[in-house]
Amino acid sequence: MEYKHIEQSRIPACTLDEQLFRKLWDIFNQDGEFLWHAAVGTGDDLLGKKEERSTQNVQSLEELIGFAKKLPHIDQISLTVEVPDKGTMALALQNFVPISGKLIVSGQEEAWVNERFDACLALFTERKKDFNTLIYTRLGFGIIQTAIPLSSMFIFVMLAAGLLIPSEIRHSQWLWWITAATVVITLRLAYTVSDKLILYCMEKYPYIKWQER
């Protein structure tokens, strides 16, 4: 069904707890009965290199809370709610690369959409982690994933080449081969450093994490 009005926004990096989910359900329940579907990711591939990811469908709110509590790392959470004759609410939290979180509310009535959207987003904003959110912006993650690894490895390789390769060789016909080799080595090392830096950030500053109040 196509709805007339839609609101959507990025969900900030935040902590999750039982109170948040129960308040979400209170929002869903405001119009009476609703249909819903939820799945929790159970994988541990933080770098997002696996094409297929393991997920577990949940059948109740208690089961959803139970899964989120016991998992050492919440890989992802997707939740879709349909309120008959009103609209839909959907949220997706992806705790692996590419890291993301999104809330979408659509419906026939603009007031209904705005009210449900503001109420849902406020729950996550209350638990927002400012530094974690900054890390996973496009700019912040670009610095971690690309800028720091490339610049640091470029300096390291250039210094190593200057110290290990004699000057007469560096200024001979081997210059172009040396240049090509340093570029390849720089990119390879930067790729490895990038993966390790991303893993460090995601473990120390996760996008979402269960944390009881």
Image (cartoon, grey):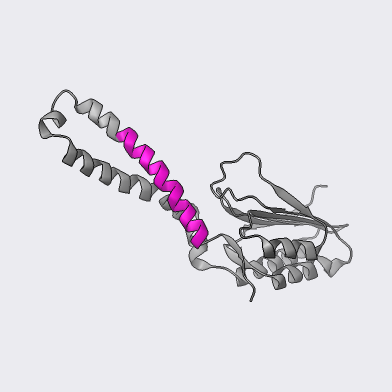
Residue in the picture at 22% in, 42% down: 160
Residue in the picture at 74% in, 51% down: 56
| Residue farthest to the bottom, as pictured | 213
Measured as percent of width and height from the top left, residue 168 is found at: 10, 30
Query: Is residue 56 found left or right of 165 in the rendered image?
Result: right
Measured as percent of width and height from the top left, residue 7 is found at: 69, 57
Q: Which residues, given as a range, are shown in magenta? A: 183-204
Residue 136 visible in the picture: no
Q: Nearer the viewer, residue 91 or 169?
A: 169
Residue 196 visible in the picture: yes
Which corner quadrant of the image does residue 157 belong to? top left
Which corner quadrant of the image does residue 20 belong to? bottom right
Which corner quadrant of the image does residue 83 belong to? bottom right
Q: Nearer the viewer, residue 100 or 212?
A: 212
- Above or below residue 142? Residue 31 is below
Residue 94 belongs to magenta span = no
Q: Nearer the viewer, residue 75 or 111?
A: 75
Query: Is residue 203 found left or right of 82 in the rendered image?
Result: left
Q: Nearer the viewer, residue 190 or 78?
A: 190
Measured as percent of width and height from the top left, residue 135 is found at: 48, 59
